[in-house]
Image (spheres, helix red, strand yellow):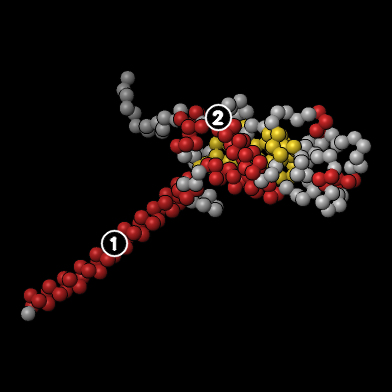
């Protein structure tokens, strides 16, 4: 009798413990990414590092382009307005010729084309920096509804910069109207530094890791 009672007591203790063990593993697995972000203080305010890193770069840039497009006011540019592009540059190192800047520019501008923006190659023409002659400027500043497309189009330019951080690259882009230098749209976003991003930035591939704090060679 005592043997049977002992067996039942062991089973009663073992089964809940096994369940707790499985639950503990599941909780650990589910929260591993959050723990990484908390310990290393790398999580942005909107998404965790691992969640953002899983999104393709082109999708992140397309979302940024959508925001740039939505910020353009109804009367700031017409549908025929040419928007020239300039290669995105490293804000801390303007001489940085990494392919990263060109790829970012193309992905953002291609998405704007999909939204109907007239992306124009080459450099702006001299007349793009002035309002068309013979046109009353008040017609641009106070256009009647749907009349802006009937006026000569005003040109603009897409420019952007990036700053390389420890875990993210901080992007900034703006669309500037050329004749009055007015910024009609702007946006900031981040791109996680993944292996694919490192391939586009040679300076990151040169990182050989942390130097040892313990002396490994004696003179």
Question: As drawn, is 139 to the left or to the right of 181?
Answer: right
Residue 22 marker: 1
Quarter of the picture containing the N terminus is bottom left
Q: Is residue 85 above or below residue 44?
A: above
Residue at image coords 43%, 53%: 34
Regarding residue 162, the answer to whether it shows in the image is no
- Whether residue 15 is situated above or below residue 25 in the rendered picture: below
Q: Residue furthest front?
A: 150
In this rendered view, identify the residue nearer to me: 33 or 115. Answer: 115
Q: Are marks 1 and 2 in contact (CB under 8 Å)?
A: no
For marks 1 and 2 on the same chain, the one whose residue lies earlier in the sequence: 1
Quarter residue 177 falls in: top right
Mark 1 or 2: the one toward you: 2
Q: Residue at x 34, y 32 (%)?
A: 214
Name which residue lies at 9% across and 76% down: 4
Q: Say left or right for 88 vs 202.
A: right
Residue 71 position in % (x across, y down): 70, 49
Q: Viewer-proximal residue, 79 or 138?
A: 79
Separation of residues labelled 1 and 2 (CA atoms): 47 Å
| Image spot of residue 89 (x, y percent) | 62, 32
Q: Is residue 192 placed above or below 74 in the rendered structure?
A: above
Seen at 73% across and 28% down, the residue is 123
66 lies above or below 177: below
Q: Which mark is residue 10?
A: none
Circle 1: element type: helix
Q: Is residue 217 visible to the viewer in this orientation of the structure? A: yes
Residue lying farthest top?
Answer: 219
Q: Which residue is denoted by mark 2 in the rendering?
A: 99
Determine whether, in the image, residue 42 is placed left or right of residue 126: left
Q: Circle 1: is it few (<14), some (14-19), or many (20+) Cα within 10 Å? A: few
Residue 127 screen position, x and y as percent: 83, 31
């Amino acid at each position: 009798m005592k043997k049977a009672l002992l067996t039942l007591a062991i089973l009663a203790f073992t089964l809940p413990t096994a369940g707790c063990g499985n639950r503990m593993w599941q909780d650990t697995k589910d929260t591993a990414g959050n723990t990484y972000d908390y310990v290393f203080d790398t999580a942005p305010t909107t998404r965790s590092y691992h969640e953002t890193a899983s999104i393709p770069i082109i999708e992140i840039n397309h979302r940024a382009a959508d925001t740039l497009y939505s910020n353009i006011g109804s009367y700031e540019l017409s549908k025929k307005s040419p928007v020239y592009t300039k290669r995105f540059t490293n804000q801390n190192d303007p001489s940085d010729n990494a392919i990263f800047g060109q790829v970012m520019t193309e992905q953002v501008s291609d998405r704007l084309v999909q939204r109907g923006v007239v992306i124009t190659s080459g450099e702006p023409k001299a007349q793009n920096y002035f309002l068309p002659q013979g046109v009353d400027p008040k017609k641009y500043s106070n256009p009647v509804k749907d009349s802006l497309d009937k006026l000569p189009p005003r040109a603009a330019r897409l420019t952007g910069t990036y700053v390389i951080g420890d875990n993210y690259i901080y992007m900034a882009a703006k669309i500037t109207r050329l004749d009055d230098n007015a910024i009609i749209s702007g946006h900031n976003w981040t791109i996680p530094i993944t292996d694919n991003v490192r391939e586009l930035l040679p300076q990151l591939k040169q990182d050989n890791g942390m130097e040892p704090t313990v002396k490994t060679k004696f003179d």
